């Protein structure tokens, strides 16, 4: 393998410089949800461009979209025999509210102990800067890079990336790559290096049930009109059976069974019942029978009720029979399940089981496809070896319960798998007050990325 020792030494001795770069990015309130931060969004894009320049990337462009800009850069001098890595990231962050719960100003990053506190420190400005820091260490000691690189850093991930897919479709040649690197998956714990290899998809719905034309007096009309709140409750209660299985016919038809190898790898995760009870504060766990918690979250589709509304919900009493009831629910999907097909299954199911005593409407808000990557493909094997080299222990393989639609988009539109490491921790408080980044883990992550770039280049060159 290429001699990485000088780059690792550089990364170790220049941590303060890397941290200064990260603080300068966290300092910008790049909140994508609100128009009042539009100028700051552009400032953040320009700062990313500046950091690209620092590490010698070329063809740097801040490209407009119908929303916030996308920052592109590349470096393509490793030669055609070496693979091209497309690094994905985002520079936007969640709002900092409620501000009164922050112990320090959210956009004035502050180091306290082993942590850097600030909005975006972990999600995901810290991860973007980790990649750039690894590249700086390699360039400073080798003079060039062992791989070809393209970068795609967007400003709308926290609002669902509404303009990213059209951008990728319109720039397929510019973004062509052999593998994508998305360093935003996170770790199970500071001493448990983690590689995510599957992400669930999502489909979101709203079910509305209508009864009488207007709210009725429950004493005068109760017992002769089917209460929409009761009808909705009956429908919701029937969406799962006693084993926690979704009852909609066809829901599991395309679900890939877990192999024994996968079940063994997932069993290595230090995430048993006690872990989830501690994380949630729930009295007991619940879910589909026959599967462990980690299997349910990462490898099985699920259905959750996200919100309910009907009738009188204020203080005191009002004897009303409501005219309307509503439930918002979502499904997390696994590889091969398609959101549009799931939508059709729900429409057919509700048409069969909702009685004619009420009217109903199903609103489909859309969704994103799940994806499963190959944990044995060359880039994944190189990353697993790199994580083990940095931490000194074999990394765990994890299926993530959440959704990252860009991974499926890159897979579908560019034909490239994604490698999903990440150096954030479960208690980084992302999206919450006092978001933080564990700096010792972040520093090991930078070293792991150095190892990865060299290992992947050598592996592909053999």
Image (spheres, helix red, strand yellow):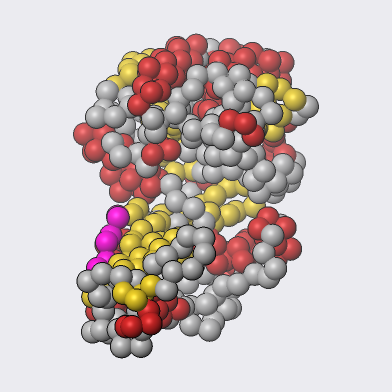
Residue 57 visible from this viewpoint: no
Tell me which segment is drawn in magenta: 361-366
> Between 342 and 412, which is closer to the camera in this rendering?
342
- Seen at 74% across and 44% down, the residue is 191
Examine the image and state in which quarter residue 96 appears: top right
Q: Quadrant of the N terminus?
A: top right
Residue 258 visible from this viewpoint: yes
Residue 365 is one of the magenta-drawn residues: yes
Residue 100 is one of the magenta-drawn residues: no
Position of 379 with respect to 414 (left or right) is right
Chief secondary structure of the magenta portion: strand
- Seen at 35% across and 53% down, the residue is 368
Position of 213 with respect to 382 (left or right) is left
- Seen at 59% across and 26% down, the residue is 106
- Seen at 49% across and 22% down, the residue is 29
Task: Give the answer, above or below, for where 279 lies relative to 423.
Answer: below
Residue 187 picture location, percent across and down: 63, 45
> Between 125 and 9, which is closer to the camera in this rendering?
125
Task: Give the answer, above or below, for where 180 lies relative to 234.
Answer: above
> Between 27 and 433, which is closer to the camera in this rendering?
433
Residue 35 picture location, percent across and down: 35, 26
> Between 415 and 221, which is closer to the camera in this rendering?
221
Residue 254 picture location, percent across and down: 36, 71
């Amino acid at each position: 393998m290429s001699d990485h020792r000088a780059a690792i030494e550089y990364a170790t001795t220049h941590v303060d410089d890397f941290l200064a770069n990260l603080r300068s990015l966290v300092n910008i309130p790049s909140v994508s949800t609100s128009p009042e931060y539009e100028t700051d969004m552009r400032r953040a894009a320009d700062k990313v461009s500046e950091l690209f320049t620092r590490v010698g990337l070329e063809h740097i462009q801040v490209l407009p979209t119908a929303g916030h800009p996308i920052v592109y850069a590349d470096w393509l001098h490793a030669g055609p025999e070496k693979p091209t890595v497309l690094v994905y990231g985002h520079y936007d962050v969640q709002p900092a509210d409620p501000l009164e719960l922050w112990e320090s100003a959210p956009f004035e990053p502050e180091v306290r102990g082993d942590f850097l506190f600030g909005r975006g420190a972990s999600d995901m400005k810290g991860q973007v800067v980790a990649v750039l820091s690894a590249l700086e260490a390699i360039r400073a000691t080798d003079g060039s890079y062992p791989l070809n690189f393209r970068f795609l850093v967007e400003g709308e991930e926290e609002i669902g990336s509404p303009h990213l897919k059209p951008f990728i479709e319109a720039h397929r040649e510019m973004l062509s790559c052999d593998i994508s690197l998305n360093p935003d998956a996170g770790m199970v714990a500071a001493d448990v290096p983690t590689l995510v290899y599957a992400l669930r998809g999502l489909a979101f719905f709203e079910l509305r049930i209508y009864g009488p034309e207007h709210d009725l007096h429950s004493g005068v009309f109760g017992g002769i009109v089917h209460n929409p709140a009761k009808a909705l409750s009956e429908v919701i209660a029937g969406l799962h059976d006693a084993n926690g299985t979704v009852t909609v016919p066809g829901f599991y038809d395309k679900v890939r069974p877990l192999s024994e190898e996968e079940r063994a790898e997932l069993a290595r995760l230090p995430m048993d019942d006690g872990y989830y009870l501690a994380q949630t504060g729930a009295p007991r766990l619940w879910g589909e029978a026959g599967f462990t918690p980690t299997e349910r979250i990462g490898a099985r589709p699920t259905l959750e009720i996200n919100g309910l509304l009907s009738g009188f919900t204020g203080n005191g009493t009002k004897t009303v029979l409501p005219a309307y009831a509503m439930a918002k629910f979502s499904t997390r999907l696994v590889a091969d399940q398609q959101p549009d097909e799931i939508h059709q299954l729900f429409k057919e199911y509700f048409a069969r089981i909702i009685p004619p005593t009420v009217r109903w409407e199903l609103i489909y808000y859309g969704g994103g496809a799940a994806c499963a990557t190959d944990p044995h493909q060359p880039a994944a094997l190189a990353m697993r070896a790199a994580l083990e080299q940095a931490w000194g222990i074999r990394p765990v393989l994890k299926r993530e319960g959440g959704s990252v639609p860009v991974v499926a988009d890159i897979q579908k539109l560019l034909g490239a798998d994604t490698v999903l490491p990440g150096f954030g921790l479960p208690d980084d408080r992302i999206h919450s007050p006092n978001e933080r980044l564990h700096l010792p883990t972040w520093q090991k992550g930078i070293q792991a990325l150095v190892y990865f770039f060299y290992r992947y280049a050598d592996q592909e060159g053999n």
